[in-house]
Amino acid sequence: MTAPCGRLAAGESQGAHIGGGNDTSMTAPCGRLPAGESQGASKYWLEIGFGGGEHLLWQARANPDVAMIGCEPFEDGVIKVLNAIEGEALTNIKIHMGDARELLRVLPAASISRAFVLFPDPWPKRKHRKRRLLNPITLDLLAQALCPGAELRIGTDIGDYARTILEAMAHEARFAWRVEGPSDWRVRPDDWPATRYEQKAAEAGRRRYYLNFLRI
Ligand SMILES: C[S@@+](CC[C@H](N)C(=O)[O-])C[C@H]1O[C@@H](n2cnc3c(N)ncnc32)[C@H](O)[C@@H]1O
């Protein structure tokens, strides 16, 4: 099921056939792609901007019944993951080498049951903030691709980025922030291994924020 760089595997590669998020005729059962694209997987999880692929590979190894879709435009990261896929004979990872928004626009509505956006590029300078990936437009695309009951995990080490995500989510009726106390956003869950970027942030003494949203 491993795809060459820049494409999803056969059956998923033809974006037009996968369908747009607004095409209700293509709506898949929760957590599944339509017949012809599912290739027997019971669930599809999506990681956006997987970087070196540490988390993507960990989740694929720990969840062999889940088809992981990894999305990353950075060629070196994609090559690392492809090498690991080949070396370990992993069969449950698909790669889209490119912009996550392109992929989100062609995924069927409600086809993804868990999504991860871990430490997206921070763009800390005020004049660059408009370049941040997580904004109301991308959150809308994610809301279309995720099925009701799905989980969206977001990590960031930039307090201002966390705040703007929470503000956008406060206006987004399709997501609810899962939080009961500070440990919910301060402590990384056990099934969320640290990424390389996060390790660097920790070494630099930066606080990390772990946000968990429920697709309603
Ligand atoms: C700060 S790095 C974090 C990488 C990894 N998640 C980690 O925590 O180590 C952000 C990653 O997002 C990727 N990225 C940037 N824009 C993207 C986009 N539009 N779609 C998908 N990935 C993107 C970058 O190439 C980069 O690998």
Image: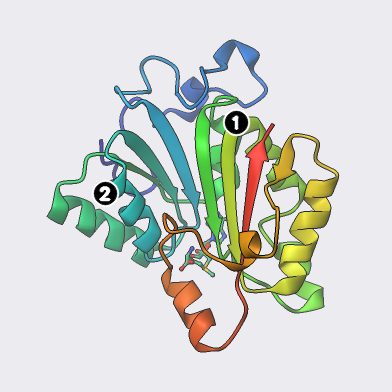
Q: Would residue 69 be found to the left or right of residue 106 on screen?
A: left
Q: Nearer the viewer, residue 145 or 75?
A: 145
> Mark 1 to mark 2: distance in Å?
23 Å
Question: In percent of the image, x 15 and y 53: which residue is there?
Answer: 88
Q: Is residue 47 above or below residue 39?
A: below
Q: Secondary structure at mark 2?
A: helix
Residue 75 x/y as whole percent: 38, 62
Q: Residue lying farthest top?
A: 25
CB under 8 Å between discs 1 and 2: no
Residue 128 x/y as whole percent: 75, 72
Question: In percent of the image, x 33 and y 27: which residue is there?
Answer: 41
Q: Nearer the viewer, residue 46 or 181?
A: 181
Residue 40 sits in quarter = top left
Q: Secondary structure at mark 1?
A: strand
Tell me, yes or no, if residue 90 can be seen here: yes
> Which residue is the site of mark 2?
61
Tell me, yes or no, if residue 53 can be seen here: no
Q: Which mark is residue 149?
A: 1
Q: How many numbered dots are placed on residues in this image?
A: 2
Which sits earlier in the primary sequence, circle 1 or circle 2? Answer: 2
Name the amino acid, label 1. Answer: Gly
Q: Which mark is residue 77?
A: none
Q: Is mark 1 within 8 Å of ligand 1?
A: no
Residue 28 x/y as whole percent: 52, 18
Q: Residues within 10 Å of mark 1 (few under 14, many from 20)?
A: some
**Which quarter of the rendering shows the C terminus?**
top right
